[in-house]
Image (cartoon, rainbow, N blue to C red):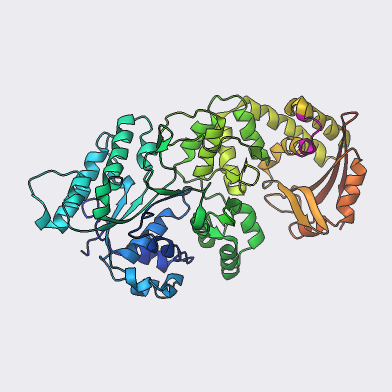
């Protein structure tokens, strides 16, 4: 059973060895092994079918390699786990390398023609062939078997570990027959009562939630966990803030900058970071967008180009730093070829990791600088007139800001307010913040994502823009304080009195203090701008 996985012919599916997890342990590893306590406790129970979906590049495969290394009879992994948290669990040795495991990465069965018509044939041929080689006495070597038929021929019980369960839906979106046949395969394996005879546990993962047909889950015996409803798996969806802060100290990385670039995912009670990006940061020692190499870019670009009323404006709002309320969190369905409404697109982008979701107020937002850059990349590639016109106006506002032309800034803010805010919301408390964020949309070229309610000094600055690059003649940081029915001068004095510059000075001494007021009676905007004097 000590085959290598270097080629298609030698790929292992049955009782795979632990080499992939060994590679993980040889690298910087954040101990997530206590997840195994959650899977151990459901073995041979009615909760033995688990589907945990999470965004791309959030460590799905690392988790599966860990589970396989722990359960598989094809290896001895005691040394790999002895220094991890799971080793202190009472049932650690009870399950360690004591199970027959079938480990399926659903991407492995893609067909050469790219239409998916040979996908299930590849799956059956490859996996059944190995089952025949592994357990030759249980099969008629001249007979063809489907995977469910082959498994039922064995007097064994298996743990199934399945990666990229949703691959056929993402890779072959128009092949409805394949979708139906694939779901039928999973049902044949796991849904029938007879599956209890050969299944001890199923841990299935992917990006998208389980498909629904006729409003019911296609696999309704599975307990499903998603980034929207993560349950006890919340802390295992990514790196927690404490884990990232520990890594930053170890590798001498600035934690606040790391937080700004990669934090922002609210999952259960945790603030989580994308593990892949943190590992890239540790290796390359550079703050950058590490999502640019992802294959999901085309999916996102297509999704945000859908022709729903207000969709493009909403995406631009999100890129500017605004949150948006959604009303139908259950609207997205993996089984559907098209999006039924705007909310389904937003939920799709949450599952992909491009947007975050705050269940406290049912809002979506761009989580961090990394995802903002990627989303802006998609927007620019789509050449939307709405974005181009907003950017042109914003460029004028930035130019006026740098030259302290407060009258022009105020007049252009009024124009944004009139064009972008519905009459019914015109005087809302949140309207002015939205106007300013849209007004400074063009700052994305030279600035990091806007910081809302930035903690500094004796309070919270309303909006702070930090330049991407700090140099003697570079762009100044912008501290913006907003007032309604007061005065711009009062806003400016608050910046000074509460020492909002204290935290920003740690980044740069080149700072503009900007006070903005909106008079709801006259509908006039006013602005005061002053350079910080150190």
Span shown in magenta? 425-433
Is most of the magenta stretch helix, strand or loop?
Answer: helix
Task: Report if residue 477 is visible in the image.
Answer: no
Tell which of 31 and 283 is nearer to you. 31
Q: Is residue 274 left or right of residue 145?
A: right
Q: Is residue 455 above or below residue 252?
A: above
Tell which of 373 and 458 is nearer to you. 458
Q: Position of residue 98 (x, y in %)?
A: 28, 67
The answer to which image quadrant residue 66 occupies is bottom left
Residue at coordinates 21% horizontally, 44% vertically from top-left?
A: 124
Q: Position of residue 101 (x, y in %)?
A: 27, 59
Q: Is residue 325 above or below residue 135?
A: above
Q: State yes or no: residue 430 in magenta.
A: yes
Q: Is residue 108 left or right of residue 483?
A: left
Q: Quadrant of the C terminus?
A: bottom right
Q: Is residue 10 above or below residue 375?
A: below
Q: Is residue 456 left or right of residue 234?
A: right
Residue at coordinates 64% horizontally, 30% vertically from top-left?
A: 313
The answer to which image quadrant residue 18 occupies is bottom left
Q: Position of residue 119 (x, y in %)?
A: 27, 39
Residue at coordinates 25% horizontally, 40% vertically from top-left?
A: 120
Tell which of 440 and 233 is nearer to you. 233
Q: Position of residue 133 (x, y in %)?
A: 14, 56
Task: Report if residue 93 is visible in the image.
Answer: yes
Q: State yes or no: residue 174 in magenta.
A: no
């Amino acid at each position: 059973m000590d085959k290598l996985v270097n080629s298609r012919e030698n790929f292992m599916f049955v009782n795979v060895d632990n080499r992939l997890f060994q590679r993980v342990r040889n690298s910087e590893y954040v101990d997530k092994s206590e997840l195994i306590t959650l899977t151990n406790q459901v073995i041979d129970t009615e909760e033995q079918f688990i589907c945990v979906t999470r965004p791309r590049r959030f460590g799905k495969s690392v988790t599966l390699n860990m589970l396989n290394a722990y359960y598989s009879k094809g290896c001895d992994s005691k040394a790999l786990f002895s220094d991890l948290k799971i080793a202190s669990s009472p049932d650690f040795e009870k399950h360690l390398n004591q199970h027959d495991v079938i480990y399926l990465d659903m991407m492995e069965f893609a067909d050469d023609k790219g239409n998916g018509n040979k996908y299930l044939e590849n799956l059956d041929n490859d996996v059944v062939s190995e089952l025949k080689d592994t357990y030759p006495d249980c099969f008629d070597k001249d007979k063809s078997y489907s995977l469910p038929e082959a498994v039922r021929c064995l007097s064994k019980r298996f743990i199934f570990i399945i990666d990229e369960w949703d691959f056929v839906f993402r890779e072959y979106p128009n092949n409805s027959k394949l979708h139906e046949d694939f779901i039928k395969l999973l049902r044949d394996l796991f849904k029938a009562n007879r599956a209890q005879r050969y299944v001890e546990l199923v841990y299935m993962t992917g990006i998208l939630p389980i498909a629904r047909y006729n409003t019911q889950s296609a696999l309704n015996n599975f307990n499903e966990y998603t980034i929207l409803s993560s349950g006890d798996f919340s802390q295992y969806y990514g790196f927690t803030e404490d884990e990232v802060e520990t890594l930053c100290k170890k590798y001498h990385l600035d934690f606040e900058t790391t937080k700004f670039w990669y934090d922002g995912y609210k999952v259960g009670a945790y603030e989580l970071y994308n593990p892949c990006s943190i590992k890239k940061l540790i290796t390359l020692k550079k703050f950058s967008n590490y999502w640019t190499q992802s294959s999901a870019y085309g999916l996102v670009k297509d999704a945000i180009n859908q022709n729903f009323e207000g969709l493009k404006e909403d995406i631009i709002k999100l890129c500017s730093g605004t949150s948006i309320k959604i009303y139908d969190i259950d609207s997205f369905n993996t089984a559907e070829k098209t999006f039924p409404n705007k909310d389904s697109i937003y939920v799709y982008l949450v599952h992909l990791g491009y947007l975050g979701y705050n269940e406290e107020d049912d809002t979506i937002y761009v989580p961090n600088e990394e995802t903002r850059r990627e989303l802006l990349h998609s927007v620019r590639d789509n050449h939307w007139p709405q974005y181009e016109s907003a950017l042109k106006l914003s460029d004028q506002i930035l130019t006026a800001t740098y030259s302290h032309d407060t009258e022009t800034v105020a007049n252009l803010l009024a124009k944004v307010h009139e064009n972008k805010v519905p009459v019914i919301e015109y005087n809302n408390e949140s309207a002015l913040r939205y106007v300013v964020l849209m007004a400074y949309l063009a700052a994305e070229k030279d600035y990091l994502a806007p910081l809302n309610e930035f903690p500094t000094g004796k309070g919270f600055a309303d909006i702070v823009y930090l330049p991407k690059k700090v140099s003697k003649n570079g762009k100044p940081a912008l501290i913006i304080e907003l007032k309604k029915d007061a005065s711009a001068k009062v806003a400016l004095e608050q910046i000074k009195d509460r020492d909002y510059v204290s935290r920003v000075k740690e980044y740069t001494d080149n700072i503009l203090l900007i006070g903005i007021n909106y008079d709801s009676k006259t509908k006039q905007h006013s602005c005061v701008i002053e350079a910080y004097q150190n």
